[in-house]
Amino acid sequence: MKEHHLILFLFTTISTTYLSHYLIIVLFKSTLSNRKYKRMALNSKLINDILISQYTTGRQNNYMSKENYKSITSIEIVELLKSEGRFIHEFDKRYPGFTKKIIEINPSISKSEITLAAMIRLGFSNKEIAKYTYVEEKTVHTKKYRLKKKLNIQSNLDISQFIQSINI
């Protein structure tokens, strides 16, 4: 009788363990997919908010200012950030020669560093870069510092000024 209770206890324990692991995995997967959908929804809301504000500003002033135009083209670029290769390709169409000049300065520069340089060239702030790339603002600052070292930029020169000064 004791053996029967022991076997029943072991079976129950093992079954409960497997069931709990299965539930944890299912919950974890659903949490990841929820995050993905929330991120996509946030992107859509952000883009819609910007478009609406740009549209109403343009209608009130009866023209589309240069800053409003820049914001709309920035929206397109933010959409392209989801695919780093496409982003660089489209950026090169609008700013031909920029990527080539950056690579000439340091051939070992990575795609993500080229993307960062492109965002700096577009005038994105650290806060905007952080928001669009889903990292902390401090991480953007660190990435900019590393990029500055890779591009051999003098310590007294701001990376944004340097990148803006690259002639294309």
Image (cartoon, rainbow, N blue to C red):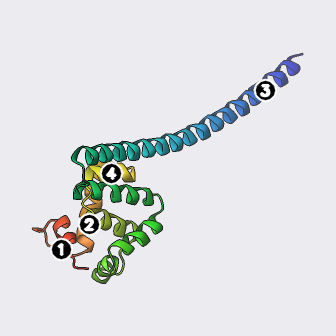
Q: Are marks 3 and 2 in contact (CB under 8 Å)?
A: no
The amino acid type of the residue labelled 2 equals Arg
* 143 vs 92, nearest the viewer: 92
What residue is shown with label 4? 130
Disc sitting over residue 10 in the figure: 3
The amino acid type of the residue labelled 3 equals Leu
- Between the residue at mark 3 and the residue at mark 2, the CA separation in whole angstroms equals 64 Å
4 or 2: tag closer to the N-terminus: 2
Disc sitting over residue 121 in the figure: 2
Q: Are marks 4 and 2 in contact (CB under 8 Å)?
A: no
3 or 2: tag closer to the N-terminus: 3
Determine the image quadrant of residue 56: top left
- Between the residue at mark 1 and the residue at mark 3, the CA separation in whole angstroms equals 72 Å
Decide: is 83 above or below 13.
Answer: below
The amino acid type of the residue labelled 1 equals Ser
Disc sitting over residue 165 in the figure: 1
1 or 2: tag closer to the N-terminus: 2
Q: Position of residue 156 (x, y in %)?
A: 9, 68
Q: Position of residue 135 (x, y in %)?
A: 36, 50
The amino acid type of the residue labelled 4 equals Ala
4 or 1: tag closer to the N-terminus: 4
- Between the residue at mark 4 and the residue at mark 1, the CA separation in whole angstroms equals 23 Å
